[in-house]
Amino acid sequence: IYKWHYSGLNRWHGAGSTADFQKIIQERCDTYTQTIRPGSRSRNCQAIRQAFMSAFISKDPCKATKEDYNSLINLAPPTVPCGQQVFWSKTKELAHEYVKRQRLMTLEDTLLGYLADGLSWCGEPGSSDLNIWSCPDWKKDCRTNYLSVFWEVLSERFAESACNTVRVVLNGSLENAFDSMSIFGRVEAPNLRPQVELEAWLVHDTGKPPSDSCSGSSIRKLKSILDGRNVKFRCMDNLSRDQFLQRS
Ligand code: AVW
C-alpha cells in the first residue's frame, strides 16, 4: 500500500539508483584523480559530479539522448594511450584481471568508466532527486534509459579514440563469442578508425572445451564489420582462462 502512494516511482523493472550516488561519484573521483592516476590532468571533481547529475536529474528516465551526456564527457573524455586499449564482451571480470597484469586499460580504467562502474541512476520529471526505487530496464521498459545511453556514448568515444593495436577479450565458452547486439558489437567495433588493428582473444572456462573459435560464424561476422572499415584483424582462440592469464 505504501508504495502506491509514491505513484510511479516503483513502476520500472530495473534496479533503482544506487544509494548515496552523488557521494560515491565524488569519492571515486577524488580517489582516481589523487591516488590512481595522480599524474593525469587535474580534474575538477565537483564540476564532474554536477555535470553528471544535470545530465539526467528531473528528466524523463526513458528519454535519454547522447547529447545529455556531452558536457560530462567533454570534462573527461575516455581516452587511453595508444596501443593500451582493451575491450570486453561477456568477460568483464577476466578482462579486468588481464589488464591489471599488463600496462593496459579498459573503459573502467578511464575516469568516467571508473566513476560509474556498477552503479545505477535515474531521475524523475518534476523532482530534483534520484529515483531510488526503480529505474527503466533495457528490455522491459526502454532502451533509451540513462544507464544504457551512458555506456553507449562513453564506449563510442572510447572506441573512436583507439590507435595502433587494440584488444578485445571474448568469451569462448559461448556459442557466439561475438555478439553483434552487444555494446562491443553495436558500438565499439563499428567505430574503430581505419588502420587500427584489433586482436581478438577467445578465452574459455578452464577445464571445459571451447564452444566457439576464430573460424566460427560469429567471428566471421566481426571480421566483416572490420573489413568494411579497413580495420586489421587478428584472432587467437582455444585459450583457457588460466593459459590466457599466465601468458599475459
Ligand atoms: P556485455 P558489452 N558497469 O557483457 O559488449 C556496469 O554483453 O555489451 O558486454 N554496466 C556496464 C559497464 C560497467 N562498467 N560497462 C558496460 N555495462 C553495461 C564497454 C552495458 O549496458 C566496454 F568498453 C553492457 O551492455 C566493453 O568493451 C552490459 O553492461 C563493452 O562496453 C555488459 O554486456 C562491454 O559491453
Image (cartoon, rainbow, N blue to C red):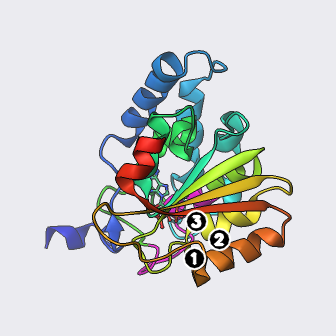
Residue 62's x, y, as percent?
Answer: 53, 70
Q: Residue 181, labelled with which disc?
A: 1
Residue type at numbered disc 3: Ile
Residue type at numbered disc 2: Arg
| Stretch of the chain drawn in magenta | 138-152
Query: Depth check: 143 or 219 in front?
Result: 219
For the residue with label 2, is its CB less than 8 Å from the closest atom of ligand 1? yes
Residue 98's x, y, as percent?
Answer: 45, 43
Q: CA distance from mark 1 to mark 2?
A: 6 Å
Query: Depth check: 138 or 131 in front?
Result: 138
Q: Quadrant of the N terminus?
A: bottom left
Residue drawn at point x = 37 percent, y = 57 percent: 131
| Marks 2 & 3, CB-CB < 8 Å contact | yes
Q: Which residue is mark 3?
A: 183
Q: Residue 186, labelled with which disc?
A: 2
Q: Is disc 3 surrounded by few (<14), some (14 to 19) or many (20+) residues within 10 Å?
A: some
- Mark 3: secondary structure: helix
How many marks are shown on the rendered structure?
3
Residue 201's x, y, as percent?
Answer: 55, 58
User: Which quadrant of the figure has residue 7?
Assistant: bottom left
Residue type at numbered disc 1: Met
Residue 241's x, y, as percent?
Answer: 37, 55
User: Which quadrant of the figure has residue 13?
Assistant: bottom left
User: Which quadrant of the figure has residue 77?
Assistant: top right
Residue 222 versus residue 54 in the image, above or below: below
| Marks 1 & 2, CB-CB < 8 Å contact | yes
- Mark 1: secondary structure: loop
For the residue with label 3, is its CB less than 8 Å from the closest atom of ligand 1? yes
Q: CA distance from mark 1 to mark 3?
A: 7 Å
Residue drawn at point x = 67 percent, y = 73 percent: 222
